[in-house]
Image: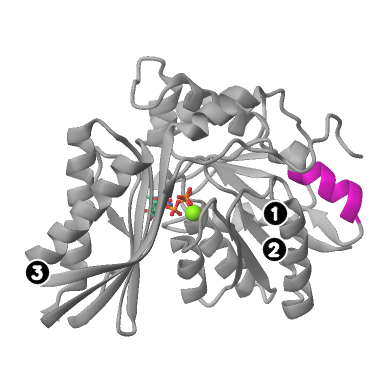
Amino acid sequence: MGTIVACIGGFLGAGKTTALQAAAAEIERRGRIAAVITNDQGSELVDTQAMRRQGVDTAEITGGCFCCKFEDLVSTMGAIVERRRPDVILAEAVGSCTDLSATVYQPLRKFYRDTFTLAPLSVLAEPSRVRALRDKGSARFPDSVRYLFSKQLAEADLIVLNKIDTLEAGDRREITRWLHDAGAGAPVHAMSARSNAGVAEWVDRLLGGSAAGSRLLEIDYDTYAAAEAVLGWLNATAELTSAGDLPPKAVAEGFIQRVQEMATDAGMAIAHVKALVSAGADSDRIALTDEAETAQWSGAARFTPASRMSLVINARVRAEPEDLKRLVLDALQASAAAFASTAAVHHMECFSPARPTPRHRFANIVQ
Ligand SMILES: Nc1nc2c(ncn2[C@@H]2O[C@H](COP(=O)(O)OP(=O)(O)OP(=O)(O)O)[C@@H](O)[C@H]2O)c(=O)[nH]1
Ligand SMILES: [Mg+2]
């Protein structure tokens, strides 16, 4: 049997990275080795750094999604196997990506059957996004994004309803039923990556040898490309310096709040804005997945005041790339000024994802 490979998909901000952190910890508790691959259209990824800071062996594939970078995915997985001999490789797909069964799972099974053993394709969904994207009346994202979301669910071997800590029991039953239908009868596993409830059972399902890549989508790539193209994508790194000591927690919260207010004023819908905040030996991740909610820290956000702090910023927002860039830069300068500091931007990419062009696309399930 080859190394187990589990691909985890689901819309932006559904909790994939948090779930992989929890799953990796659970796998290690069982005395087995987990490695992670993160993926993005750009470079400088919050998710990679967050995983590495947890001590998980993490590789990244940048500059395109798994389906468009299939050879990179295979060579990266091969290098991880050589280096670490993990029992499981957990691969986080880009949150605006779908059609992974036809473009990643089937080719892996066809060409690398002896090297890799596929675990069920898990697609994560969070309650607030389900509500926002299933209801036709919601205008925050266009129909193309609703289409993309429905396709992500329709190809899942296993749908994971995440963030159940935010749900009442009645709502949980109702959303579970809806997801089961949207996923054409796929099993739905409810859990909270944040509180760890249900994570061990999810890992059991990943390692248990259930069907993987069992569904194929019929999908219109024009609509899929249009859904990705409405998103502005920004990856940046910045450093703030001050003559005195800065409070990293307050600075980062001020920055995210400014982004939130400015996006709301401009009518931009936030899919996910996240920042990895580091000062000295301290670091934590702050994220906002909806412009109407409050940003959350992943950990306890304990920082010692420091004269220097750095931010890795990843924003996915319904906006023109240039508008998003201006907004983030303005928010950064204002946040720095509010604490008598200066901000230097070291890296900045801002774009809309290009049309997906998979290396392989299988029309049939490989047995
Ligand atoms: N309440 C709650 N929040 C969660 C849970 N899982 C993740 N989150 C939060 O949701 C936000 C997004 O989590 P991520 O794990 O970064 O989501 P993601 O799917 O990896 O996002 P992208 O990589 O940008 O697509 C963060 O603020 C997390 O702390 C959960 O089970 N419950
Ligand atoms: Mg992630």
Q: Residue furthest front?
A: 322
To which residue does mark 1 refer? 6
Q: Is the Cβ of the residue at disc 2 closer than 8 Å to that at disc 1?
A: yes
Residue position marked by numbered label 2 in the rendering = 89
Membership of 271 in magenta stretch = no
| Residue range of the region highlighted in magenta in the rendering | 104-113
Measured from the top left, where is residue 20 in percent x and y?
Answer: 55, 59
Crowding around mark 2 (Cα neighbors within 10 Å: few <14, some 14 to 19, many 20+) is many
Q: CA distance from mark 2 to mark 3?
A: 42 Å
Amino acid type at circle 2 is: Ile
The N terminus sits in image quarter: bottom right
Q: Which one is earlier in the sequence, the residue at label 1 or at label 3?
A: 1
The residue tagged 3 is: 339
Q: Amino acid at mark 1?
A: Ala
Marking on residue 286: none
Q: Look at the image and say whether residue 109 sits in the magenta stretch.
A: yes
Callout 2: SS: strand
CA gap, disc 2 and disc 1 = 6 Å
Residue located at (29% from left, 55% from top): 296
The quarter of the rendered structure image containing the C terminus is top right
